[in-house]
Amino acid sequence: MISESLRVEVWDRLLRRKSLAELPLCTREGRVCLDGIQLPEPAVIGRWQTPLADVSQIEPSGTFREVRWSDLDFSGSKLPSLRFYASEVNNCRFDNCQLRDLRLWGTTIRDCSFRGTDLRGSALGAATNEGPLKGIRNVYLGVDFTEADLRDTAYLAAAFERCTFRNTKLVQINFRNSTFVECRFEGELREVLFWRTGFEGEAFPPNEMVNVDFSRAKLRDVEFRGLSLDQVQLPSDAEHIVIQDFAAVLDQLILALRQQGDQTAKILVAGFEVARKWAAPHAPGVLNTQDLAEAGPDAVERVLVLVRQSNARPN
């Protein structure tokens, strides 16, 4: 454990972009040990009301522009409200950190670990359509988000490549214009949106979902909007119904359920109409039996019967 005075000196040097080389710091697995840094909560410097919400302006705990961090271990630290602009963070560890309200612009995170990290309220895809960083996304390469808390995180656009989301808290997430290449998802995702091209996405490349693995994931109210999914592994367990040519089958399900007309059928139709709006032509899709069951006690069996009658072969 490093002393409090040394922690203060470390943080002051990081803020001033000074070297840590001559400080008496130990290393662990090739990284400089900086674990246990405790920054205070950011100060509120202004408050005002808008028609939509009460807004607070804060003084960030640390703002970093064009910095290059490498081989640092912040495990177990409390680092709220950090800001990074046009920076690079390489081979760093933030395991079990409190990193709420982290905001990144035009920043690359490479070969880093956020295992068990609290990232709630962070803007991880805070790209911009104006200014010097126009059209430049945050990039995550080889990043481990195992058991991290990503609830209430925001995205305009980010690039995720070779990233792991194992038992990550992904709830009510709209990834908008984010792209995914060779990423793996395990555990539950709930109310998550993946888009081929999201709103305000003209400056960013489309999301092709290349070699993305959901085979060990639980997809609860997860939508793949406009995506072909031809390079995606979907879960194939008893909880999921994977359907080829999802759009065509949804058309048949909606027609049949409208004719049934009872309350369960109406709830199913409402959900299927949303899915149909965004289903890519001839692409596969997936339904979750737990989601279907919320429509009524016999909803799952009804859907399975209709899928069989549609000549589709659910996997």
Image (cartoon, helix red, strand yellow):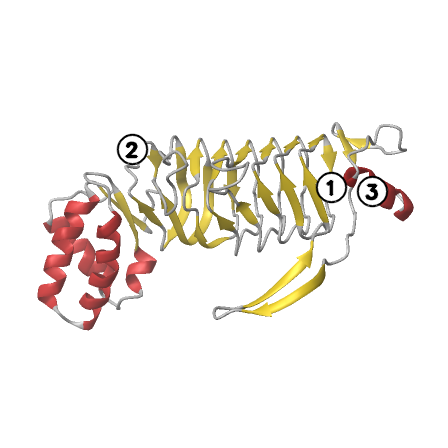
User: Could you tell me the amino acid type at mark 2?
Assistant: Asp
Name the side, left or right, on which 26 lies relative to 311: right
| Marked residue nearer the N-terminal end (3 or 1) | 3
Q: Residue furthest front?
A: 131
Most extreme residue toward the left, as rendered? 259
Q: Which residue is mark 2?
A: 230
Question: What x and y, as percent, mark residue 306?
Answer: 14, 54
Look at label 1 and name its amino acid: Phe
In the image, taking residue 242 as reference, residue 199 lies left or right, namely right
Q: Residues within 10 Å of mark 2 (few under 14, many from 20)?
A: few
Q: Secondary structure at mark 3?
A: helix
Residue 202: which quarter of the image?
top left
Q: Residue at x 62, y 53 (%)?
A: 101
Q: Which mark is residue 74?
A: 1
- Which quarter of the rendering shows the N terminus? top right
Q: Amino acid at mark 3?
A: Asp
When asked about the image quadrant of residue 212, the answer is top left
The residue at which mark 3 appears reads as 12
Asked which quadrant contains residue 281, the reply is top left
